[in-house]
Image: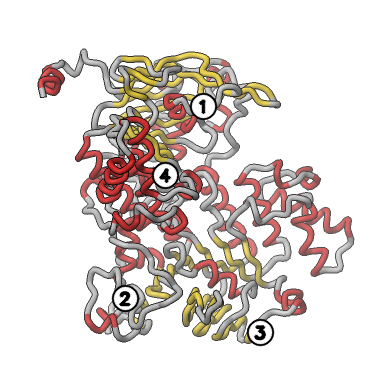
Amino acid sequence: MAELLEVIELTRYFDIGRNQHVHAVEKVSLNIAEQEIVGLVGESGSGKSTFGKTIVGLHAKTSGTVKYRGESLPQKYVPADFQRLAAKMQMILQDPYSSLNPRMTVGEIIGEGLRLHTDKKAGEIKDCVADWLVKVGLQANHMSRYPHEFSGGQRQRIGIARALILQPEFVVCDEPISALDVSVQAQVINLLRELKDTMGLTLLFIAHDLSMVRYVSDRMAVMYLGSLVEIGKADEVYFDPRHPYTEILIGSNPEPDPQLERNRPSTAIQGEIPSPVNVPEGCRFASRCPQVMEVCRQTTPELIALKDVDRKVACHLYS
Amino acid sequence: MTQLATETVLDPQTSPPLLEVENLAVEFDTYGGTVQAVRGVNFTVEQGKTLAIVGESGCGKSVTVQSMMGLIPMPPGRITSGSARLRGIEVLGRNAIAGKEIRGAEIGMIFQDPMTSLNPTMTIGDQIAEPLQGHRGYSYRRAFNAAIELLDLSKIPEAARRARQYPFEFSGGMLQRAMIAMAIACKPSILIADEPTTALDVTIQAQILDLLRDLQTETGMAIILITHDLGVVARMANEVAVMYAGKIVEHGSVDDIFYRSAHPYTLGLRAAMPTNDPSLKHELTPIEGSPPDLFAPPPGCGYCPRCPHAMQVCDSRDADDYYLEARHFSRCWLHHDAASLKPDELYFRNSD
């Protein structure tokens, strides 16, 4: 499979004044092949969303490169870049309540991309919007309604239709299901998978529901405090995690199986994710790691490939 | 001590359960009409045990517990029928039983969003001290010192310093610990946890769930856990009540619900979730459609329009509770003798 997207040492800092910076994403490198689904997991504050938004140009890059089909994307997007790239790269936003303009009808929201990026006439746009409403499981006559008339699950579908109507090649899904009920989550996941098959989409799937990420993704990447700590095949990472953080993350995830839960030792990790403002030297997980060594507090581990499995891990235990 | 001794001799069959809710129904008047949010709910909670109430948004799970706490605004809310008895004494419509206030003292509650449930203008310690001053008549100094102990019990490091801080200085997980400290301040016999970990990360969720379990072992309180996460249910619950459209559709022990699920809605919920069996990557089967409009609840089973096994009778008449075992019932016509399809034949079923 050809690489669709190459992210090389992508870094994004946020300036918070007094010469201090939030190190939201620090030197993350990640390749995504065509028609692949890469799941990105981590605690809140680990930089998942910032990473996704920086890739599609919603944040400027502090340093690092994003290559799309071999072409380096600009460091900071100008309107012309959005105009050119929005048809190829899109994003489904996390919150279906705040990401739809309450003063636009659903037809205007979904059709806006076509209006700005194609020379389709109003009638054609309307037909296209009607098609997409049906494709995402709504009705064509919903076009004239406003977002407040829809439930959370329906709004998330509107967000999906808006992102996909331009037929992009690459879509960042930022927690597309976390605001939804279980029964509706499955509807949205099945819809995304179906559209992936029919349209040949490539997805970066950001979520904190580990079981769902394992289910959806081909590969799973784990972030901690702005850096990538482990990446590999989704099933393998889930059932055989190698990085101590991944192990704890997956151990904390409650499984819908009471017998398994009863027999499982508590793996709750002490403490919380530290502030990304003054990031300590060495491994970022050192302060919470149960297997911390002296070297962890001094040198930052590189992401290295393991020999026995197809996996990359950033941990001194493996170097 | 003598009281404890008499309690232990009581036959568990005849002594009333800690909490017994019978035929509870709650309505709300709105501009659009009357919403029948809870439509006849029965359950019991035993001392030291955890009951999980599961269901999707709008199924009435929060309203059920809020009505016991007297947290339903009336009007527009109205408890139309039913009773809730704590150790045999009716609590609905009353503020106190045997001189002890129900809300805060007998039943403690923690909420989903600790960020908005705490007062931003009061220090954490003062907020925890408040119920002790109110319910127990402690002096401020005594209550504040008790608050520090409670924070310590909730495993907040440097409790004495943290007690003087404001909510904005706490992280989400720490705020939830502070809420737990506040809820258990007056040693309630029941703690209601309404989606206590939904806003938290899995690692912090694991910490909070561990804390709740430890506190339960120490104090012997019962927990009513409201959640939609079946993983959390599997980790925490002894008994599970599955709610749909204002009614409990299936109730049983946690093993009954997970390994011997009988109601099509419970089966549907399980089929909609990814299993964590490496050998099995079954297709997710979503439950199509949406819950019924509770302005005009259907005369029959609320799940009928979405149920893949609906029969003619389901549309017009609601089923009874069919007891499959002593403490496991399912409210579905499929258990009737005349039904040709048996729940055993539905979807997948794990053997245990």
To which residue does mark 4 refer?
Answer: B229
Camera-nearest label, 2 or 3: 3
N-terminal of the two: label 4 or label 1? 1
Residue A310: x and y in percent read 36, 76
Camera-nearest label, 1 or 2: 1
Question: Can residue B318 be seen by looking at this rendering?
Answer: yes
Mark 1 vs mark 2: same chain? no
Judged left or right of residue B92, residue A110 is right
Q: Which chain carries label 1?
A: B
How packed is label 2: few (under 14 Cα within 10 Å), some, or many (20 or more)?
few
To which residue does mark 2 refer?
Answer: A309
Q: How far apart are marks 2 and 4 (CA)?
A: 32 Å
To which residue does mark 1 refer?
Answer: B72
Mark 4 vs mark 1: same chain? yes
Q: Quadrant of residue A123?
A: bottom right
Specify the amino acid type for callout 2: Val
Q: Quadrant of residue B159?
A: bottom left
Q: In percent of the image, x 73 and y 79: which residue is there?
A: A78
Q: How far apart are marks 2 and 3 (CA)?
A: 35 Å
Q: In which quarter of the image is the N terminus of chain B?
A: top left
Q: Which mark is residue A74?
A: 3
Q: In percent of the image, x 51 and y 32: which residue is there?
A: B59
For numbered disc 1, what is the local secondary structure? loop
Q: Quadrant of residue B158?
A: bottom left
Q: Residue A183 carries which label?
A: none
For numbered disc 3, what is the local secondary structure? loop
How packed is label 1: few (under 14 Cα within 10 Å), some, or many (20 or more)?
some
Camera-nearest label, 2 or 4: 4
